[in-house]
Image: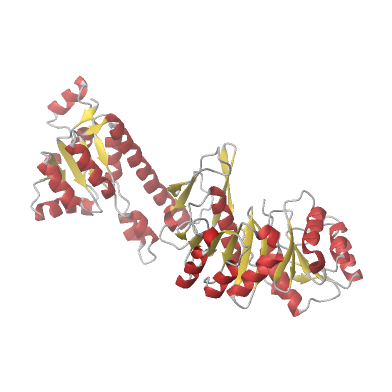
Amino acid sequence: MSQLYPRRALISVSDKTGILEFAKLLTELGIEIISTGGTFRSLTNAGIQAKEISEITKYPEGLDGRVKTLHPAVHAGLLAIPGSLNHQKYMVENNLFHIDFLICNLYPFESISENPKSSNEEIIENIDIGGPAMIRSACKNFRHVAVVINPSQYKNVINLLSNGGFSLEIREEMAKEAFLAIARYDSAIARYFCDKSGETFPSDFPTDFSLKTTLRYGENPHQRAAIYACNHLRNKKNLTNSEILHGKELSYNNWLDLDAAWGLVRCFQEPFCAIVKHTNPCGAALGATPKESFTKAYEADPTSAFGGIVGMNKEVDVSTAEAMSIPGKFIECIVAPSFSTEAIAILTSKPTWKKSVRLVQVGFNASTTKSMEFRSIDGGILVQDSDQVTETENEWTIVSKRKPTDAENKHMLLGWHVVSKVKSNAIVLVKDGIVVGVGQGQTSRVESVRLAVAKANAHAKGSVMASDAFFPFRDGVDIALQAGISAIIQPGGSVRDQETVMACDAFNATLVMTGIRHFRH
């Protein structure tokens, strides 16, 4: 049977959005309705003719609503194959009949479990049993049953019924969507129990993502790409849920760079700006105002900043927007908690930016941490806690003879946060609240030092240096000291740490060890 025009529909919905209008149209189209509990009462109160499920099962609803549809009359009706003689014999002998249309959505477990005011008892009672069971039965028999699981489908369903019914291809697509919904629902329940037990890495990792949108392409035009949103964070302010105020569609690479920029700027309370290229900061600075932080960050390396991704931790106001839109500057995307109305007008009126520049508004009080990180490898995924810099200067160990000044402490703290977001091997130089040199992704630490010093040029003298991991030899430290660097912060832990200490003492430089490494591969 390629085309299905249903004769009998079973309606059991927790979300009753649009159900009265939908059911009324179904009856007008000649489809018999069977319904359950609260749905049945809603339909009959609205004057819509329906049979209560107990008329079919010959059993009353029981156990405070836990048992309504868990009955052979329901599941045989959904699972029976019309062309099977054995199935028909069973149906006739037991006085059962076919149900060829299921409209069902589930108890709101996700929203209830995410509400901090919900009790454990309330959460448990919102684990739907009968709904998923019916959906699975109907989906397994998609060749003979149509399944609707979301009110957003109602309008299209009526259009299909008005034009002859559901094709086999459409029924299979409905089944696929329903199975995905069940998988998401079960994952949410599994995640709840894992979180409750404190189990970080369960034996089976529950999936927790829904498609947000497909992208034009991946890192390169021949690669397909999409972005998925984390379901349990769907009501939180974060980058994935951000509002695109202006500009063309974000690309795969844009999203990666936006994440790098946003992840860095939200580490600071003072006005801070980071400019990112290829997920690494090429400029970053603190300032008394957002405008000052942007100006300092951009001027630190204007060549690399051209076409970069700008991250701000404060609202982009008029003066900042004016500084950004000075002729000669080109910015690909700007991500910030918010943009003033006047700033948006300024940024989008620049002729070369009218269509290109993307303004991404995340919102204030946005999520400050990613609890887990995922990366794919051949045949699987790697999962780890997100790396957050939590150590403070009170936890550092000063191993040099000279103690750092207050200014050096401030700059080392800035450099320590920034270096944790730079690809290893990572070296960051900071001076006057500005990241003046970055060495990243080199296969030896000494090469990263050389690169950072070369980037900083004359600004290297008097700067502080942050290293994401220890120095295996003193050669990188010697290069830094010879360039005039006055203070170094690093984890320590090398068998040659004492050589590094001796080098710093010889140059009257200060050396701080944090005891914590911040690799970023």
Determine whether 514 is above or below 171 in the image: below
Which residue is at the front of the view, 326 or 149?
326
Give the colour scheme of this rendering: secondary structure
Q: In this view, does 235 lie to the left or right of 484?
A: left
Determine whether 441 is above or below 163 in the image: below
- Give the quarter of the image for residue 462: bottom right
Which residue is at the front of the view, 429 or 49?
429
- Give the quarter of the image for residue 309: bottom right
Q: Which residue lies furthest to the right in this view?
A: 506
User: Which quadrant is the N terminus positioned in?
Assistant: top left
In this rendering, does residue 29 appear at all? yes
Residue 138 % position (x, y): 27, 36
Residue 19 % position (x, y): 19, 51
Residue 464 % position (x, y): 77, 69
Q: Which residue lies furthest to the front in this view?
A: 351
Residue 432 % position (x, y): 73, 74
Which residue is at the front of the view, 459 or 157?
459
